[in-house]
C-alpha cells in the first residue's frame, strides 16, 4: 500500500482488519477502494461485512443506501444494494432501488429478472409472469427466466407448464442439477412417470452428492413407488442434513407406511411445531389416520 493504493490491495487490507477486529479501519479501507472504483461491488460487500462484523448491520444497510443514492447511474451498485435490502426485510426499499437500476438501464435483463424475483417473493404472480414472458420472448433459452417461470407455474399448480419449462432448461443444460431435481419432484408428485423421475433425481444426486435436496427427492420418488423402507433411508439422510419441516413430514409419512408409528409421530410432532401450515402437514396427518388401524412395528 505504500507503493500503490489499488482497490484490490485496499480490500485485502480491509479483510485483514476485519479479522483483527479493527472494524473502523476496515470500513475506511473499503471506502477508499470505492473512491477509486465506484462500481466495485466486491468493495461494497466488504464494507457491508465490516459493519456486520462490528455489530452495526443496520448502520451498514443505511450506508449502502446512501452510497446507492450517490450513484444512481450504476446498475451493479443498485442491484447489489437491492439484494441487501431484500435480505434485511426491506422489500419496498429494494423495489425502489430496482426502479433506479431500471431507469439507469431500461434494457438490462438482469434488472428485469431481479424485479421478477422480488415479485415472486411477494406473490405478485401476474407482474412476474409479464416480465418473464418478455425476457423469454427475447431469449427463449434464458435459464434464470425459465427456472423462475417454472417456479411461478408450480405456485399456480400448472404442473404441465412447470414441467415444460424445466425440460427447456435441460435441453440447453442437460446436467443442470437444480432443474433435474425439481423436474424429478414434480414428475413424482403430479404424474405417474416415476421411473423417469427417479432417473432425473439420481442424476441430480450424482452431480451434487452432498446436497440434502437430492436425498429428499429420491426418497419421495421411492415413497410414491411404494418402496417405503428405501424412502425412509433417503428421508433420514435428508433430515440429518437439513432438519426442517417439509423433510420431517416426508420422513414421518414413510415411517407410518413402514409401521413405525413411534418415530413417525416424533417427526410429525416436531414438524408441526416448525410449520403447521405446509401442505405436507395435512398429507402426513392423513397417512397417520390411514395407517392407525394397522399393527405397529416394535
Image (cartoon, helix red, strand yellow):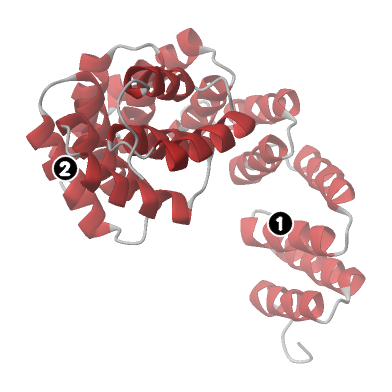
Of the 4 image quadrants, the one containing the C terminus is: top left
Q: In the image as oriented, which residue stretches furthest toward the top?
A: 126
Residue 144: in sight, yes or no? yes
Name the image quarter holding residue 133.
Answer: top left
Q: Secondary structure at mark 1?
A: helix
Q: Where in the figure is residue 211, as x and y percent of width and height?
A: 37, 55
| Among the two numbered marks 2 and 1 on one chain, the one whose residue lies closer to the N terminus | 1
Using a 10 Å C-alpha cutoff, classify the residue at mark 2 as few (fewer than 14 neighbours), some (14 to 19) or many (20 or more): many
Q: Label 2 to label 1, Cα distance in Å?
A: 39 Å
Residue 82 point in image, percent of width and height:
66, 37
Question: Which element type, helix, strand or loop, lies under badge 2?
Answer: helix
In this orientation, does residue 134 appear? no
Which is nearer the eye, 280 or 89? Answer: 280
Q: Residue at 27% of width from left, 33% of height from top?
A: 185
Residue 179 to residue 152: above or below: below
Circle 2/circle 1 CB separation < 8 Å: no
Quadrant where the N terminus is found in the figure:
bottom right
Task: Please name which of the two marks, 2 or 1, marks the residue nearer to the observer.
Answer: 2
> 10 Å neighbourhood of mark 1: few (<14), some, or many (≥20)?
many
Q: Is residue 202 left or right of residue 18?
A: left
The label shown at residue 200 is: 2
Q: Position of residue 260 (x, y in %)?
A: 36, 40
Pointer 1 residue: 44
Closer-to-camera residue (179/271) = 271
Left or right placement of residue 219 versus residue 11 in this view = left
Amino acid at each position: 500500500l505504500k507503493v500503490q493504493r489499488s482497490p484490490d490491495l485496499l480490500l485485502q487490507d480491509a479483510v485483514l482488519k476485519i479479522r483483527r477486529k479493527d472494524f473502523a479501519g476496515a470500513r475506511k479501507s473499503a471506502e477508499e477502494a470505492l473512491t477509486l472504483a465506484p462500481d466495485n461491488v466486491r468493495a461494497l460487500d466488504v464494507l457491508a461485512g465490516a459493519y456486520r462484523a462490528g455489530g452495526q448491520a443496520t448502520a451498514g444497510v443505511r450506508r449502502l443506501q446512501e452510497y446507492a443514492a450517490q450513484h444512481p447511474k450504476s446498475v451493479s451498485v443498485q442491484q447489489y444494494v437491492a439484494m441487501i435490502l431484500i435480505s434485511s426485510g426491506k422489500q419496498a426499499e429494494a423495489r425502489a432501488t430496482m426502479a433506479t437500476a431500471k431507469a439507469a438501464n431500461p434494457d438490462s435483463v438482469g434488472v428485469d429478472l431481479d424485479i421478477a424475483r422480488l415479485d415472486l417473493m411477494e406473490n405478485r404472480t401476474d407482474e412476474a409472469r409479464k416480465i418473464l414472458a418478455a425476457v423469454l420472448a427475447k431469449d427463449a433459452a434464458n435459464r434464470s427466466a425459465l427456472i423462475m417461470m417454472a417456479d411461478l407455474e408450480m405456485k399456480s399448480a400448472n404442473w404441465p407448464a412447470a414441467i415444460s419449462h424445466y425440460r427447456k432448461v435441460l435441453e440447453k443444460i442437460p446436467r443442470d442439477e437444480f432443474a433435474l431435481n425439481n423436474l424429478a419432484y414434480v414428475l413424482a408428485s403430479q404424474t405417474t412417470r416415476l421411473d423417469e423421475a427417479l432417473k432425473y433425481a439420481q442424476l441430480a444426486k450424482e452431480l451434487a452428492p452432498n446436497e440434502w435436496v437430492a436425498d429428499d427427492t429420491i426418497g419421495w420418488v421411492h415413497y410414491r413407488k411404494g418402496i417405503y423402507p428405501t424412502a425412509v433411508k433417503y428421508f433420514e439422510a435428508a433430515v440429518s442434513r437439513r432438519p426442517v419441516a417439509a423433510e420431517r413430514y416426508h420422513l414421518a409419512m414413510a415411517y407410518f407406511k413402514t409401521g413405525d408409528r413411534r418415530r413417525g409421530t416424533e417427526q410429525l410432532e416436531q414438524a408441526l411445531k416448525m410449520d403447521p401450515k405446509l401442505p405436507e402437514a395435512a398429507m402426513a396427518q392423513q397417512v397417520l389416520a390411514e395407517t392407525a388401524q394397522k399393527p405397529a412395528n416394535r
